[in-house]
Image (cartoon, rainbow, N blue to C red):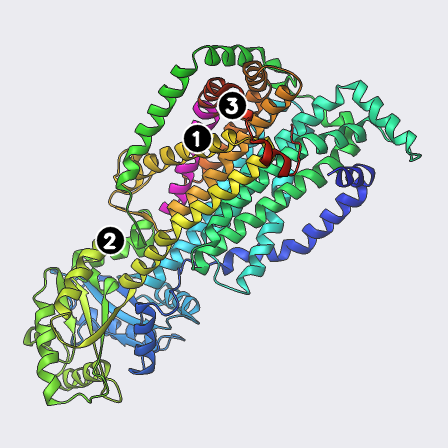
Amino acid sequence: MRALAHFVTRRPWLVLALWTLLVLICLPFAAQAPGRLSADPGSLADSESARVTALLQGKFGERDNNTVLLLIGSAAPQGSPEFQAPYKRFMQGLEGVPGVSRVTRYDAVRTYQAVSTDGRQTLSLAQIPLKTGAKETLAALRSYAAREAPAGFTVQVTGVQAIGDDFTGYAESDTKRSEFAALPLTALVLLLVFGALVATGLPLLMSVLSITVAMAGLYGLTTLTVVSTFAQSVVTLLGLGAGIDYALLMVNRFREELGREELSREELGREHSAGEHPVSPAQAAAYRTILSAGRSVAFSGLTVAIAMAALIIPPLSFVRSMGFGGVMVVILTVLVSVTALPATFALLGDRVNSPRLLKLTWSQNAQASAGWTAFARRVTARPWLAVLSCTALLLALAAPALQLRTGYAGAYGLTAGVESRDALQQVQRLGAGGLLSSFEVVFDLGGRSYGPDTRGTFRAVVERLRALPEVRAVISPFVQASDLASSGGATSTDAIGQLATLSRRSISADRQFLRLTVVPDHYLRADQIDPFEARLRASLNTSGLKYLVGGAPVGEREFTRAITDATPLAIGVVFAATFVVLMVAFRSLVIPLKSILMNSLTVGAAYGVVVMVVQNGVLAAPLGIPQGVGVLDSSLPLLLFAVLFGLSMDYEIFLLSRVQEEHLRGASNEEAVVLAVGRTARIITSAAAIMFIVFSAFMVGRVVANKSIGLGLAVAVLLDATLVRLVLVPGFLKLAGEWNWWLPAWLERRLPRVHIEH
């Protein structure tokens, strides 16, 4: 660290020039990154749903089985000439949209309801590519619908692709809106803390710098794998939150060092004795800032990076991309904080405190706070009360987390006013919402050809499935009379042609595989998929045929189970790595255990609040969260754990490093705790206020997952920086006494020695 500090403070212009060059190179790529992100979680290699998709493509010739629903409203009823002529022209034009492979009119032979009771709403379908070209085709389709909709017609578009694209688009715009909303308020808090314009601007500038480079890194990652839309939110949240936190700590320490004339003289004397060019007091103060606060920032960043690495463990590139993004932005934030920021200090010197706009002694005093010192003495005077009351409150808040349910929220993950969500609600009322929750079943005849001997078995399977609760239809070659009757204006020739199409889609070219599609009577929410699938499989098990079940609902549940199964390992790895890092840093076994336990209490409390609001709907309306979401997004619990655990460790290290510093100077355990709180409480609460603003800004938007992340993080930082760090931790440290610093002698001899302070 000394070599880095020496280089940065003696070559500040070179350091800043290198960062400026890097940012200029990264800017074009950072600007393009959001458009390359995806809301598609992908599929697991060799999963059941992936095998079904492969069979549909290889054996049944399915290429474009990505269904877009067009809900067409009109003033004239569907049977009238005023409707038929413009509708026909519109549908003919739709067939010519590049990428649209097939169009199904509302009056085709079908097994779902496609006309409203008053005849003024109809449902038509279009097939677009499943993967490559899907986004572009949907954009062209939407453009055509907006441009060519006949007079008196309204066309709303929904479907899996439309929901995913809306999710991605609104996630990007929500993130930008959150940044713009948070920055002015954050600047105001920084101005209250520092009182000077330059000191206020530095943390914001450093955060923007690290976010820009990290977004360019995400762009590079998109060339290698699918990158989650959430990765941008993670980069922004950590870049602003942790970046401003670290810069706040560094600026505060630098201002403190500037006031220590004896230190400056010592550093100056050391440089002269080494025969080097004289250094300024600003360079000496910046040098000392790197060796003190810089070390604390580096260790804090290491713990945050370890926590974010938890997202790399699940075998899903969608989730791993969030982990890579988080680790990348944290590393960049630390590098900026210990290089670019001190280099700026070395050049600015006392000018970091200018121009002075506000003077508030209670917030801008770099010395220990008398108020917080007195508060810490009251806490340590009644440690049992502090520990038991805080623990009870946190456990009470965490209790709803026991009911946590996860899944892909789909359209429920968007707020009202988004076209794909609003259109799906209309389709639900029409009775055709199940089209987006269809299950694909493929039967393997084991090398036998489909013929009269298997026809009866196949028909029996279809009949049993039709009789199941909540099944709207089973698409198969065995069409019922009611299906033919529902074909509206279709001629008998049309009906015969469509029946032939049904046969081709249900029987493979080599006649050794059969396929049917089960359509539920409504769009299945994530928590409704498992019961429906269980009934479906129970019926299929009686067929005696070998089968596979796929479709969007199955893929969504496989994705959820993959994350859930990997979560214990991910949490265990984070706990173990964090324990080792803290043990080395603080030469203690008790401190790491205490830190992990108390951070877990914070995470649990945040989980409980998010479950209560988002999943159960308590106070959801005032926060702009729609009722009926029913689940948390599959990746949300692990993502929240990683970010919350990492950022909570920030405050832990800020406080404990000062406790250790005071203890090593000879203060008793209790006095070290009191002095540390007096020194750090102002900076912790200021940093928490900034983080709370940043995270709360993410609650304003159209994507429920982003709102959930913002809610969980805002609650966590509020609890962590107040109850946990300033009440629970000091109370525990008082009770533990000298055991806080206990380490077996044999382990003491083997551990490397590091020194952190701030």
The one nearer the camera, 272 or 169, is 272
Q: Which residue is mark 1?
A: 598
Q: Which mark is residue 739?
A: 3
Q: Residue at x 33, y 29 (%)?
A: 395
The one nearer the camera, 5 or 64, is 5
Say few, some or many: other residues with alpha carbon within 10 Å of mark 3 (under 14 / 14 to 19 / 20 or more): some
Q: What is the magenta segment's predominant secondary structure?
A: helix
Q: What distance separates the C-alpha of mark 3 from that of mark 1?
A: 17 Å
Q: Which residue is mark 2?
A: 525
Label 3's element? helix
The outermost residue toward the right is 275
The one nearer the camera, 259 or 161, is 259
Label 1's element? helix
Locate the N terminus by quadrant: top right
Q: Is residue 735 above or below residue 293?
A: above
Residue 451 x/y as whole percent: 14, 89
- Work out whether mark 2 precedes mark 1 in sequence or the reverse, and give the earlier one: 2
Q: Amino acid at mark 1?
A: Met
Q: Is residue 666 visible?
A: yes
The one nearer the camera, 276 or 350, is 276
Q: What distance separates the C-alpha of mark 3 from that of mark 2?
A: 51 Å
Q: Amino acid at mark 2?
A: Arg
Q: Is residue 271 above or below residue 128?
A: above
- Work out whether mark 3 precedes mark 1 in sequence or the reverse, and give the earlier one: 1
Q: Give yes or no for contact between labels 3 and 1 (Cβ–Cβ under 8 Å).
A: no
Residue 527 x/y as whole percent: 24, 51
